[in-house]
Image (tube, rainbow, N blue to C red):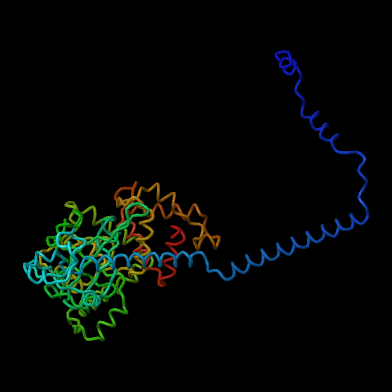
Amino acid sequence: MEDACQDTARKPSLKKSELFLLEQNAVPENLPPPTDKYKLKYQQYESEMKEEYKHYSQRVAEKKAHKIQTSEPPGKTDEKKEDVAAERKKQTVVEQVMIDQLSRAVISDPEQNGKADAFENDSVLPGLNTAPLRFRKRTLHETKIKTRSALTENVLSNKLRFDGRLISRNGRDACRELIGFYFAYDKSLTVYEYRQFGKNRTNALPFIQKGIYSHQRGQKKGKQYCLSDFCVGADLTFLSLQHPSLPESIKQKPVFTIRVTNIDETARAFLKTSGMENEEHPIKQESDCRSIFRTVQGRLREKLSKRGVRVVTGLGKYFRELDRKHNGVLSKTDFKQALKMFHLEVPEEDFESLWSILDDNNNGNIDYTDFTRAILGEMNEYRKAFVRKAYMKLDYNKTGSVPMIDIKKCYCARKHPQILADSATEEEIKSAFLETLKDACSNPHEVSFSEFEDYYEGLSIGIMDDEDFVNTLRNPWGI
């Protein structure tokens, strides 16, 4: 046995070429050649297969072409997906609000009712008097426990849903997703915040608890909120002290503002026509205030048409440098000096009218963001929504500031009108944008939300069409 194994081990291993020859030799050499009939059949089979494959390729190409023609452009498809996702978010918040606000009847063991005789008369199976609670008959019982309210789904259904955003220079606060509800039955309101934790976990948390609130600023100060106060662009003001659970960044000011960005017009029309609430007519002083704002803004519009970006970003930077206390407010003298420096002088009478409107507390200081928006105007909420969307994409960690190096990496100028017209290169457009943005920033290495918003606020002044403005955000930031 050992010798056999040794002999086997001594045999040289076959090479690949030798194995190939052995395989070739295994085929019989005396096979007859194919007949003409077989050759003809093979030729027919080959031609049929080629023709079938050709038809199959044509059908696939036609299907692809039809799909491309009937399908919507990528931008439109993305918008539809975003709309569906936004509606799902709102529905999640609606369901959470209903769960949080509905009262629940108290259910307990009938023996706690104190009416043992009534319980004993009930027909129950033998032995169930001592059975576990889940097997005993359960009924509503008289109790001293009182529910907080008597709300029902029917009562809560008469509500107006609206979207809102915080008026804040803090990027983290300004980009919070707020969804509010105004209830017609008692003129109360609540605001919830839609929060996302990671990729899959979401939650709707109360931002402002349900209650009856009043205006805290302006001509309606002290008046309770009513249905006419809710429209796109309206400001809802609240006292910070009434909401101890708010973030510290919001509680730094005694009054904070939520701007209404979207509203359920169908629900508003129903509540208005159903007579569930009498509409209040707007105060005459409010229309007078709006008239003064439009007059001043109209006079400055021509001056800003060609240098809107430089003026708005420059004013913002100038005010931030003057704000040594970091409380966001400045004096009348500071504002007059700023207008003179940036060649935005207005008649003294108009300035005093503006000041009397904005300084509603008569303390001699006002918020410089409020002043800038009042004297220069501001873009509508449709445009602002895209500015916030672009910034949220850049500030994915929600820190409130974006490093300038990230701005440089993400900005794409390929579809800029001047590049498409061959009047400028991509590098020239990108350099001009970054230079302007750096000039607007207090720290040249990072961009805050207010600085980013100021840039597009100034750019918005010279662009009349909303879609043209939105494209200036869609193309470079890919939103």
Numbered label tally: 0
Apparent side of residue 395 relative to residue 277 in the rendered image (left or right) = right
Q: Quadrant of residue 63?
A: bottom right
Quadrant location of the N terminus?
top right
Given residues 347 and 65, the one toward you in this image is 65
Residue 324: give x, y in percent of width and height.
18, 51
185 vs 462: above or below: below
Q: Residue at x 51, y 64 (%)?
A: 74
Q: Residue furthest front?
A: 126
User: Residue 126, located in which quarter of the rendered image?
Assistant: bottom left
Whether residue 458 sits left or right of residue 219 in the image: it is right
Q: Nearer the viewer, residue 277 or 31?
A: 31
Q: Nearer the viewer, residue 442 or 211?
A: 211
Judged left or right of residue 382, residue 10 is right
Query: Where in the figure is residue 393, as x and y percent of width and height?
Result: 38, 55
Taking 209 as reference, is 381 left or right? Answer: right
**Quarter of the C terminus within the rendering:** bottom left
Residue 26 at x, y percent in the picture? 84, 35
Q: Residue 59 location, x and y as percent?
A: 68, 66
In the displayed image of the protein, which residue is found farthest to the top? 3
Answer with the quarter of the image where residue 240 lies: bottom left
Which one is in front, 123 or 18?
Answer: 123
Question: Is residue 24 positioned above or below 462 on the image?
Answer: above
